[in-house]
Image (cartoon, helix red, strand yellow):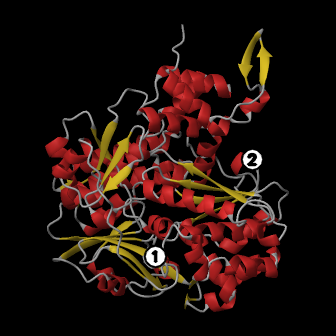
Amino acid sequence: MAAEPTPAERAVITRSIPESETVEVLGRVVHGGHDARQQRHLLLPALAAVQSEIGWVSPGALNEICRRLLVPPAEAYGVATFYALISIEERPPLVAHVCDDIACRQSGGNEILSALGDRLDVITSPCLGQCDQCPVVLMQRAGQDDFVITAATSADVAAALNGAESATTPSHVEGGRLLKRVGQVDPGSLAQYRREGGYQALARAFELGAAAVIEEVKMSGLMGRGGAAFPTGIKWEAVAREPAPRYLVCNADESEPGTFKDRVLMEGDPFSVLESMTIAGFATGSSRGYIYIRGEYPLAFHRLETAIAACQANGLLGGDILGSGFDFDIEIRKGQGAYICGEETALFNSIEGFRGEPRQKPPFPVQVGLFGRPTAINNVETLANVPLIVLEGGAAFGAIGTPDSTGTRLFCLSGDVVRPGVYEVASGVTLRNVIDLAGGIEGDLTSILLGGAAGSFIGPEHLDLRLTFEDARAAGVSLGSGVIMVFNSTRDMKDLVRRVARFFRDESCGQCVPCRVGTARVEEAVARANGSIEASLIDELDRAMKDASICGLGHTAAAVVRSAIGLGVLGESR
């Protein structure tokens, strides 16, 4: 007999899956039929709801979800086991996820794990997106909201496991355009946001019209801020040309180690994210928007959820927004711990209720994206620039920075700097300038991780590199997601490089052989390094992954290791 859910599990599932009409299948009444199959996109929210309320997804709960959505149990099992924050084995109701990634591992994270690591309620975690406040621990609580402990100690974690709460310290931010409201305006107050100029850009967009908004964005030269640096206006124009229905997706699955700028915007200025999405939805002719936010950001999720409710109650989301005749609404989807879901097509699969595995391209999302429809997808920082472009005009925005790298950029400073945080600077300032804004380097500089785990380690000779797309390209590096992580001479570089290699091995979805096997072989080669490193093997693996991997994870998985070999921090090449 199949396992049955408990009454509590059944209640949670009923809340997360709306009742649909019943149909008779093979002589028995079941929920849904075709309508249920169309609700497959509710699979991840249902799994997450049970996990959040009960602390794990039991066989009975999984069977009930499958019954209601008509999802084959094997497929639902594959989805449930794909995500680190969902457990199909019983866990304690309160679990500490202790970050042991690049920034945290040598700033106290390993000490916490050493002190508490033999406990069943302590789990090691990849980067939690708070690298400016290491070490960091995510507390996952059954039946209650999750919370994050920053600058944690083993005593803090032990106390939290006994029921104590701890408030997150706000990140240090500096900047006058994208960050101007962060820390200055109540993030829960729509009235304050509007007093500070909020929703003027949306009203202006309605005056201009959709086509004119796209032209202004094209004129601005705005490039994607998530790493790919694709021209935003060109993407929107391509989507707008396709037949309806269309979708707008905000990629807030900020899982790149060392990156936390999008979190700061969502926590500190959530209404600006919603206004930006609404303008993008209007410009592209999209009727619905989705925010896919990583599950490790409980505060950002709560503030966006509150902001969406306020906008819906005040006519800023829903039907006939501001009397314009434009209908648009936004739904949040919470990721459950999978770095690969930051890849746009893996994100679509995750929303649709499948494993978060990347799709082959072409077709590209502008033609076949979410639910098979034309989709514009941008990250939080990219979208946050849009109101400025609409109000100032594309030409004025384009005059900031350099001709090929317009506007300002947000950089995430962490590691051995005096004041870690998020710094907004005009494109074109040097790496040295940004580090100086953060108070300079603590100790003797050994290396800098630029661009995140998919970026490169660079040495002191690059301090005068201008932070533009064109200068980074010329130097053979990438700005990626805006990571600048500084390491002094006290840091164990081999340990850090191996942690990056292990990160990619763990986060590979396993769909394609070159990435699944290649990331494991790279990590093993770094582990074997003892005064020398097999550089030729790393190069061969890098070429194989670049040539044959489906997505960017495999294309960039060996980049950091190759850059570390170039710096000589792994010993002599052989």
Residue at figure coordinates x 51%, y 47% from the top left = 335
Front residue of this view, candidates 243 and 567: 243
Task: Indicate whether 7 appears above or below 233.
Answer: above
Residue 120 in the image: x percent, y percent? 25, 33
**Is there any visible trace of residue 481 in the rendered image?**
no
- Tag of residue 182: 1
Task: Indicate whether 258 appears above or below 179.
Answer: above
Q: Is residue 266 left or right of residue 42?
A: left
The image shows a total of numbered marks equal to 2
Front residue of this view, candidates 401 and 165: 165
- Tag of residue 113: none
Q: Secondary structure at mark 1?
A: loop
How far apart marks 2 and 1 lie (CA) works out to 36 Å
Q: Is residue 265 left or right of residue 70?
A: left
Q: Secondary structure at mark 2?
A: helix
| Three-letter amino acid code of the residue under disc 2 | Gly
Front residue of this view, candidates 518 and 205: 205
> Given this view, does label 2 or label 1 mark the residue nearer the observer?
1
| Three-letter amino acid code of the residue under disc 1 | Val
Q: Residues within 10 Å of mark 2 (few under 14, many from 20)?
A: some
Residue 436 quadrant: bottom left
- Tag of residue 372: 2
Residue 267 in the image: x percent, y percent? 46, 65
